[in-house]
Image (cartoon, rainbow, N blue to C red):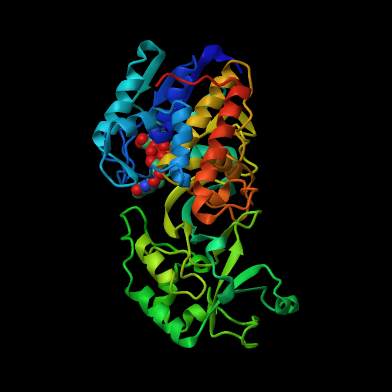
Amino acid sequence: MNHNGQAMVIGGGLAGCEAAWQLLCRGCRVTLWEMKPERYSPAHSSPGLAELVCSNSLRSGDPASAAGLLKEEMRRLGSLLMAAADRTSLPAGKSLAVDRQLFSSHIQEHLLAWGERFQLVRREIAELPTAAPTIVATGPLTSDALTAAIQRLTGRECLYFYDAVAPIVAADSVDPTRSFWASRYDPSSEEGAGDYLNCPLSEETYHAFREEILAAEKFPLRSFESPRYFEGCLPVEILAQRGPRTLLFGPMKPVGLTDPRTGRQPWAVVQLRRENASGTLLNMVGFQTKLTRPEQERIFRMIPGLSQAEFARYGSIHRNTFLRSPGLINNRLQLISYPHLLFAGQLTGVEGYIESAAMGLYAGLSLARMLTGVELSPPPDTTALGSLIRHITTAGKKEFQPMNINHGLLRPLSLRIKKSERGREYARRSLDDLSAWMTQQGIEVLPG
Ligand SMILES: Cc1cc2nc3c(=O)[nH]c(=O)nc-3n(C[C@H](O)[C@H](O)[C@H](O)COP(=O)(O)OP(=O)(O)OC[C@H]3O[C@@H](n4cnc5c(N)ncnc54)[C@H](O)[C@@H]3O)c2cc1C
């Protein structure tokens, strides 16, 4: 792939701007196509590039947290978004919050400052280029025409429109004395084996739990999120509303399970299933929800065994266009069947501002290398960036769901390290490995 160092980027959001910046800084020429202000998605409202559509917080700034670590890695790779965030930050405790208007202006001005090497075209793209090296970064609310074009290339079954995700908790935050491993109807479960970690609830706890779900604060539906739920994927609060026992025939079904502590079937159970190969993350099976995050923490911690649960991802249900990336895109973010097309941002199946921008950064870096005739190897999965790339390219296809960065995605630490020190150790290992990877791949550190 040569094309005289000329690249196209579709979508001037977080990922598209970051991709364009990396391409420009690494010697390429870029045309960025953005449909605003000619056309707005239902969530966008400002004509500026890199618009933050909702919260102005980019989450934790502390590298000992996974979100903070990803940000630090991006800084080291010369991220424009991180530079903008650092310059336009507002006081927000440990979080990195920004003035959204200044943030967007900073990014737009820095891209336009490249002069004739950077062309910004304000137009909707409805078809994918047939040969030009292109990064598609049109986000969770990609326009209808382009969505149809992507579908024609990938097949209908490879593009999703809804996220209905259950919370994920850190395995080591579940109390083993109040839960037991077993599979339904599996005789081996009596010996503590089985694929599910079950948290049993008494009748009284079950009813109190259901009452709290009914009364909880929920995210309001936005105009473009019509509540068309699949019966098999209903939010827990809808099930709870249907009747006092409905949950007992759904995600809290106890049949086929015996609590080894009582020798009896519990009144109700919440089942947790391994979310990753290393078993560091557990998915709360069937607990997709529109409860707000604080309410999820408060109410789900009522479940015996989960009183100290650490949430690696919260449950949610929202409109989200994303690819079933595993098997469809490779670890350079190219569409395997049309390698001149790379995907970036939330479309690749990551979740969140910073994760989307990180996929833009990597797609830009990756395409810049291809245009100069060198192929990039992905960063190791000891880094936050590498672990996200691994997740979207190798996770199980069937149950693939978008993911925020969290420590459970990184390769587990090999040493026995105290829980309170693990965050720092993840950060130390990751930043060392990132700089070794940059040296090995010949990735220049960009001037700040
Ligand atoms: C309603 C909503 C609220 C969210 N709130 C948060 C939050 O608070 N915190 C968080 O971390 N994450 C949030 N997210 C998730 C996600 O982090 C953001 O959507 C993020 O902006 C995704 O980055 P992106 O670059 O992939 O897409 P975007 O930032 O959406 O950028 C895509 C760009 O492509 C343009 N575009 C679309 N189609 C075309 C086309 N055919 N031709 C040309 N241009 C096109 C769009 O106008 C847009 O500018 C939210 C998502 C949604 C939908």
Q: Judge whether residue 402 can be spotted in this image.
A: no
Q: How many labels does the image show?
A: 0
Res 432 quadrant in image: top right
Q: Which quarter of the image is occupied by the N terminus?
A: top right
- In terms of image quarters, where does ligand 1 lie? top left
Q: Nearer the viewer, residue 311 or 128?
A: 311
Instruction: Please say if 374 is above or below 431.
Output: above
Q: Which residue is drawn at 60% across and 64% down?
A: 273
Furthest toward the right, the residue is 188
Residue 369 at what x, y percent from top left? 58, 20
Left or right of 216? Residue 65 is right
Q: Closer to the camera, 94 or 44?
A: 94
Q: In what quadrant of the picture does the C terminus appear?
A: top left
Is residue 314 in view from this perspective?
A: yes
Quarter-of-image position of residue 101: top left
**Image location of residue 391, percent across then percent down:** 59, 45
- Left or right of residue 326, residue 110 in this image: left
Q: Where is residue 188 in the image (x, y as percent from the top left)?
A: 75, 76
Please state which of residues 374 and 141 is positioned toward the viewer in this rendering. 374
Q: Which residue is drawn at 61% across and 40% down?
A: 381
Q: For this view, does 94 lie left or right of residue 24?
A: left
Residue 429 rendering spot, x and y as whole percentages: 57, 39
Closer to the camera in the image, 425 or 308: 425
Residue 83 in which image quadrant? top left
Q: In this view, does 228 lie above or below 260?
A: above
232 vs 416: above or below = below
